[in-house]
Image (spheres, grey):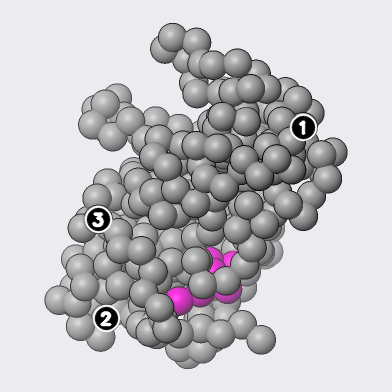
Amino acid sequence: MNVLNVVPMPSAPPPPLPNFPHVTVLLRETIDALEPAAGKTYVDATLGAGGHAEAILEVPGTRVLGIDRDESALALATSRLARFGERFVPVKATFSQVLEVVNRYQVGKVDGICADVGVSSMQIDSPERGMSFRAEGPLDMRMDMSSGETALELIASLSDNELADVIYKYGDERRSRRIARCIKQAESAGELQTTLDLRRAVVRAVGPARVGGVDPATRTFQALRIAVNGELSELAELLDAATRAIKTDGVLAVISFHSHEDRLVKTAFKERTLWAPLTKKPVVPTDMESIANPRARSAKLRAARRIEPSELFDDTTDWEDA
């Protein structure tokens, strides 16, 4: 049975996160899609530091259920949003549990859900999380550090070929066989404990980064993080649950950061008996936002209105990307 908690009380405190370091991505565009209004209830399914939730709650009379599996993020957002009193309810859960959360708090179907999927800047910038090779930390990568297997445990449980498949599938890494072999060799030699150990194994396999190029370990770290946290299956379950959690004319707004995530959202919104997309193409950050927050550059926002099967919809519209 899944356990959903309000204001979690962990037995051992998780690593602290910096105070409000996360810059909310596509904030104005997400709020424009949701159109929050008094008397309506929304779910921020990936609460993080609470930026999207705060913008919704700034509209008087709104209510937000804020979901996150990360206890540190929940504590941070709860402090930030305390001024809204009972209009904000923090919930420890995964975003795939959105329907359970809505049912638990007996709010009926909600007027909108937003989700900023993937890893947050706060988690990337915390060495204890082990999600980045820019600082040494344990090979953990879990968003919820109280449960599930770590990246190191996942690597140990996989064969060379299985690890290569993970790296190729979730990282689009063409050199996955060579990389997996070097990672497993490092593990067997007792030389794989930290994020920098993992990066060294990748560099041994494919060589150092070219000047000005992407670090060779980027795709491998992405792939392992996605696998550890079940990010794509979580997103698929959220998209399915949202069809039952959002009322007619309510809006689902999803911000994704890589092609696997965006493809899932795009495919879900093609179901014309359930969703009417609000834009023909995904909304992307402005040049100004990308310069101010380089991590926003790959973000794509897709939003759609929940419709009933009886509603007419022009199926001749082309919703493909340019």
The mark that comes first in sequence, 3 or 1, is 3
Contact between labelled residues 2 and 3, with CB atoms less than 8 Å apart: no
Which residue, as the protein is rendered here, is positioned at the far front? 189
Of the two numbered discs 3 and 1 in the rendering, the one whose residue sits closer to the viewer: 1
Residue placed under numbered mark 2 in the picture: 87
Residue placed under numbered mark 3 in the picture: 18
| Magenta stretch holds residue 208 | no
Q: SS of the residue at dot 3?
A: loop
Residue 123 % position (x, y): 40, 52
Which residue, as the protein is rendered here, is positioned at the far left? 83
Residue 28 % position (x, y): 28, 47
The mark that comes first in sequence, 3 or 2, is 3
Name the kind of residue labelled 2 in the image. Answer: Arg
Residue 130 % position (x, y): 48, 49
The C terminus - image quarter: top right
Name the kind of residue labelled 1 in the image. Answer: Arg
**Which residue range is magenta in the image?**
92-97
Observer-nearest of 182 and 314: 182
Of the two numbered discs 1 and 2 in the rendering, the one whose residue sits closer to the viewer: 1
Say whether residue 195 is visible: yes
Say whether residue 267 is visible: no
Q: SS of the residue at dot 2?
A: helix
Alpha carbon distance from label 1 to label 2: 52 Å
Observer-nearest of 318 and 130: 130
Q: How many marks?
A: 3
Residue 1 % position (x, y): 66, 86
Pointer 1: residues within 10 angstroms few (<14), some, or many (20+)?
some
Alpha carbon distance from label 3 to label 2: 25 Å
| Magenta stretch holds residue 95 | yes
Residue placed under numbered mark 1 in the picture: 181
Pointer 3: residues within 10 angstroms few (<14), some, or many (20+)?
some
